[in-house]
């Protein structure tokens, strides 16, 4: 017996520890609701059984009361027949006595069944109160479970977001931005460098073209002078 008590205490301690640590409040709540629904089922069964006994006791009371009344009437009829000479007095007294004994017996059973009926009806009222309380608690717990699930969902999402934010190092972020800026600056400088090289290449080509254009112009002037000289000679001739 002591061993079982120790096991029970250990089980209680583990349950309380789980609740204190909130290891899984949703499962604990769901289990509590299942337990209450099981208790509700048992209470409803007990209520139905007690109601049946109350009905049976009420029916028995009515039957025994009717029987007592019937035996009372039979005893009176027996005595009336004896008075009319339809039945011997001694026989009428004997049978009337038996009828009255049956009446007393049924009256006694009617009282007993009435007491049982009252007792069962009180139990019915008590059980109906228990059923109502359990139903109310189940509804309350189910509403709380719904709220708890929503809170856990929001809490998990918030925790996940905060965890991600906590894992981001501000120093690393600034360093990353600086490296990106440096990389962009290098790319911009490289682009500018290629542009200058392209401009330099175009400048050299222009200088060459200009130098060549000068020579061609000078040659053309010489040729023009020669042509003019030839034309002058032709006129002289």
Image: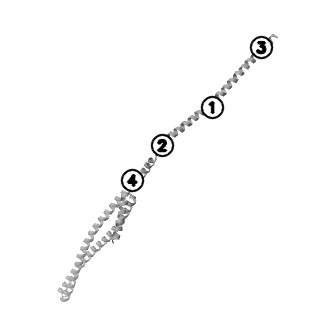
- Of all residues shown, which one is farthest toward the top? 236
- Whole-angstrom CA distance, mark 2 to mark 1, is 38 Å
Mark 2 or mark 4: which comes first in sequence? 4
> Which is in the foreground here, disc 4 or disc 1?
1
Location of residue 204 with respect to 108 vertically, above or below: above
Q: Give whichever of 72, 133 is nearer the camera.
A: 133
The x, y position of residue 224, in whole percent, is 74, 17
The x, y position of residue 218, in whole percent, is 72, 19
Mark 3 or mark 2: which comes first in sequence? 2
Q: Give whichever of 121, 86 is nearer the camera.
A: 121
Check disc 1 and report the residue beneath it.
Answer: 198
Residue 232: image quadrant is top right
Check disc 4 and report the residue beneath it.
Answer: 151
- Badges 3 and 1: C-beta atoms under 8 Å apart? no
Check disc 3 and report the residue beneath it.
Answer: 229
Estimate how packed mark 2 is, as few (under 14), some (14 to 19) or many (20 or more) residues with alpha carbons within 10 Å.
few
> Which is in the foreground here, disc 3 or disc 2?
2
Q: Give whichever of 137, 48 is nearer the camera.
A: 137
């Amino acid at each position: 017996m002591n061993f079982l008590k120790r096991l029970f205490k250990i089980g209680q301690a583990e349950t309380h520890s789980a609740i204190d640590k909130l290891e899984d409040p949703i499962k604990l709540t769901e289990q509590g609701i299942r337990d209450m629904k099981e208790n509700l089922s048992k209470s409803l069964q007990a209520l139905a059984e007690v109601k049946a006994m109350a009905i049976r006791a009420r029916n028995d009371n009515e039957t025994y009361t009717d029987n007592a009344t019937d035996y009372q009437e039979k005893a009176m009829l027996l005595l009336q027949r004896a008075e009319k000479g339809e039945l011997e007095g001694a026989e009428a007294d004997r049978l009337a006595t038996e009828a009255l004994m049956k009446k007393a017996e049924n009256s006694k059973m009617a009282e007993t069944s009435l007491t049982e009926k009252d007792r069962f009806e009180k139990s019915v009222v008590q059980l109906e109160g228990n059923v109502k309380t359990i139903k109310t608690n189940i509804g309350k717990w189910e509403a709380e479970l719904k709220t708890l699930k929503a809170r856990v969902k929001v809490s998990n999402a918030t925790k996940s977001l905060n965890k991600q934010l906590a894992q981001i190092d501000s120093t690393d972020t600034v360093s990353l931005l600086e490296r990106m800026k440096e990389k962009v600056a290098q790319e911009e400088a490289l682009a500018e460098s290629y542009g200058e090289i392209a401009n330099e290449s175009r400048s050299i080509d222009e200088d060459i073209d200009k130098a060549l254009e000068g020579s061609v112009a000078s040659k053309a002037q010489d040729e023009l002078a020669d042509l003019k000289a030839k034309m002058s000679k032709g006129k002289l001739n």
